[in-house]
Amino acid sequence: MTTENLNKNGANEPVTCTWDTNSECDVCPIHRALDCKWERKHLIRFYLNGLPFFIPTAIGMILTIIWTGNWTGFIIYAAFWMFFFGFFEIYVLCRHCPYYSEEGRILHCLANHGLLKIWKYNPGTMNRWEKAGLLIGLILFLGIPVVTFIFGTLTLYEAETGIFFVIILSGITFLTFGGTLIFGKNLVTKICPHCVNFSCPLNRVPKEVRDAYLKRNPVMKQAWEKTGYRLG
Ligand code: SF4
Ligand code: SF4
């Protein structure tokens, strides 16, 4: 499967209307129901929604290293980030996404913007192993900081470095846990109901909207139908 089709005049055209500059979105019945065209404001919205998690995570990592001298949690998390976002998540999730169907080696999308597209675009659905892998990866992504800070707090308590440090780091632990819940809630209530990667286990787009998008995108529609999916 290439990322381009030949149209009836024999010229190349984008494989999804998300990247087709002639897609006539103004007259599309699902215009506004989906975040189906790249816009900077959607990318900014994603990261703003993640701030309640990202900020305490960054502060907690720095304080854990400075106060305990232990880099283990940070190194594990940095290695996980590189593996998960650079290699694993774009295989199980992003290569199925219409945003991934753009020509070129760099991903332009509403979240993992700027990553290198090391895998080939796959217009079909995520399989069950990919879905399970994604969910396990997301749990680790959100959970590793909290576990790191719990161990950091216990280390400070046992070392009797002073109650001040213990209170601050345990407070950061609670803030990070709360930020995880807020980020997760923001994702499933604000972003997933409009996301065009329909086979993601977190996707919340109504079937009629999803089917309308598939009908406008024959390559995707055919790949979905091969897996047994039936349009309404
Ligand atoms: S589904 Fe396609 S044609 Fe319709 S608004 Fe989105 S990008 Fe445009
Ligand atoms: S699934 Fe999300 S992060 Fe991946 S390419 Fe699509 S919009 Fe980007």
Image (cartoon, grey):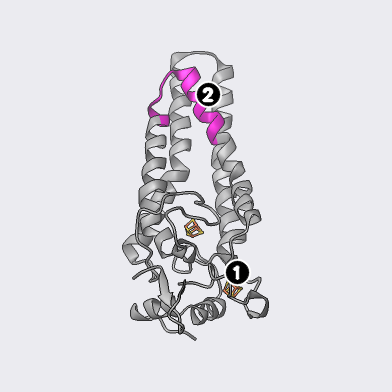
Q: Which label is found at residue 34? A: 1
Mark 1 C-beta to ligand 1 under 8 Å:
yes
Residue 230: give x, y in percent of width and height.
Answer: 42, 84
Give the vertical position of 41 relative to 124 (above or below): above
Q: Nearer the viewer, residue 173 or 53?
A: 53
- Range covered by the magenta-colored residues: 57-74
* Contact? badges 1 and 2 (CB < 8 Å): no
Image quarter of residue 25: bottom right
Query: Whole-Å distance between the Cαs marked 1 and 2?
Result: 40 Å
The residue singled out by tag 2 in the image is 63
> Which label sits in the foreground, 1 or 2?
1
Residue 178 location in percent, x, y? Answer: 58, 43
Q: Is residue 45 left or right of residue 166?
A: right
- Residue at coordinates 35% horizontally, 61% vertically from top-left? 120
User: At numbered mark 1, what does the secondary structure look like: helix, strand or loop?
Assistant: loop
Asked whether the viewer can see residue 178, the reply is no
- Say if the magenta span includes residue 154: no
Mark 1 or 2 closer to N-term?
1
Front residue of 123 and 2 = 2
Q: Position of residue 132 (x, y in %)?
A: 36, 59
Instruction: Work out whether 151 lies above or below 215.
Output: above
Q: What kind of secondary structure does the magenta stretch mostly adopt?
A: helix
Q: Amino acid at mark 1?
A: Leu
How busy is the neighbourhood of tag 2: few (under 14 within 10 Å), some, or many (20 plus)?
Answer: some
Q: Quadrant of residue 140?
A: top left
- Rendered residue at 42%/71% (across/down): 4
x 59%, y 18%: residue:
164
Q: Is residue 68 magenta?
A: yes
